[in-house]
């Protein structure tokens, strides 16, 4: 997306800091809201309908495909839709993800889920802070992580067809490393975009849309980091 390729203006322009902080707060606020919505729906369904959803493979595949459609739709149409529509799309995706992730409460004990959530939050916070304050350009790291993610997806699909526990362990470890890198990279890009918003290079409506897309990006980083850590740290029932 071209929104993450904005040039970084001087961060100390008059009045820019407040706008930058407002943008960053909006990004993390919507990300937190999305995670809360996902967690609530996943927990609720785990006690009522998760087993039926997990057993209905056709429905589950449809829901996953719908998630992909929503994410791709937001990615390609973010510059054409309103901020309100973008927000609805993000919240709809977060709700769908809650449905498809409800199975984790059936597969792992609650203590493991809680432990992994706190481990994910700590890791996400540390790497996000690093990405925000570092002066080192993380573009190369982001490119490596993105290429690694493509390879990880391919290997994961192959491992679903021909399961191998050792390969699964390697996939989980590599997945953690990739999303740790992406958290830092994406946070740095959001900071750069916040600078552009603060300097008035992005209008208010576009800034709101970019904040929602930034929230979606970090939301995906957090959820995937959590799932890979859960495979490593979680105790199955």
Image (cartoon, grey):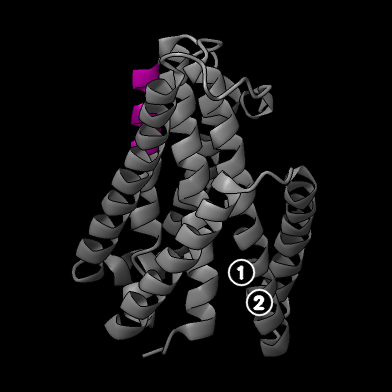
The kind of secondary structure element at disc 2 is helix
Residue positioned 49% across, 46% down in the render? 218
Q: Provide residue 190's location: percent of width, then percent of height.
A: 55, 35
Q: Tag count in the figure?
A: 2
Label drawn at residue 201: none
Q: Nearer the viewer, residue 188 or 170?
A: 188
On the image, numbered disc 2 is attached to which residue?
173
Image: 11 above or below 166? above
- Circle 1/circle 2 CB separation < 8 Å: yes
Q: Which of 126 and 36 is in front in this view?
A: 126
The quarter of the picture where the N terminus appears is top right
**Prevailing SS of the magenta stretch:** helix
Q: Which of 117 and 192 is in front in this view?
A: 192
Q: Provide residue 46's location: percent of width, then percent of height.
A: 25, 69
Q: Provide residue 136's location: percent of width, then percent of height.
A: 72, 46
The kind of secondary structure element at disc 1 is helix
Residue positioned 66% across, 22% down in the render? 6
Residue positioned 36% across, 79% down in the render? 115
Q: Provide residue 144's location: percent of width, then percent of height.
A: 80, 53
In the picture provided, is 212 more to the left or to the right than 164? left
On the image, numbered disc 1 is attached to which residue?
176
Residue positioned 47% across, 76% down in the render? 230
């Amino acid at each position: 997306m071209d929104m993450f390729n904005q040039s970084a203006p001087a961060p100390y322009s008059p009045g820019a800091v407040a706008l930058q902080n407002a943008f960053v707060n909006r990004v993390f606020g919507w990300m937190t809201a999305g995670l809360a919505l996902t967690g609530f729906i996943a927990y609720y369904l785990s006690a009522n309908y998760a087993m039926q959803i997990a057993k209905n493979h056709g429905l589950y595949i449809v829901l996953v495909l719908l998630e992909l459609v929503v994410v791709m739709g937001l990615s390609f149409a973010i510059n054409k839709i309103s901020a309100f529509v973008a927000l609805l799309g993000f919240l709809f995706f977060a709700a769908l993800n809650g449905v498809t992730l409800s199975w984790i409460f059936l597969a792992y004990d609650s203590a493991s889920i809680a432990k992994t959530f706190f481990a994910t939050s700590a890791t996400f916070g540390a790497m996000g802070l690093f990405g925000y304050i570092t002066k080192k350009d993380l573009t190369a790291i982001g490119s490596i992580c993105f290429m690694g993610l493509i390879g990880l997806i391919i290997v994961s699909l192959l491992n679903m067809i021909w399961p191998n526990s050792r390969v699964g362990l390697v996939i989980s470890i590599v997945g953690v490393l990739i999303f740790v890198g992406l958290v830092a990279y994406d946070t740095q890009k959001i900071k750069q975009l916040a600078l552009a918003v603060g300097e008035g290079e992005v209008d208010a409506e576009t800034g709101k849309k970019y904040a929602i897309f930034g929230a979606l990006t970090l939301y995906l980083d957090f959820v995937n980091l959590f799932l890979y850590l859960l495979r490593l740290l979680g105790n199955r029932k």
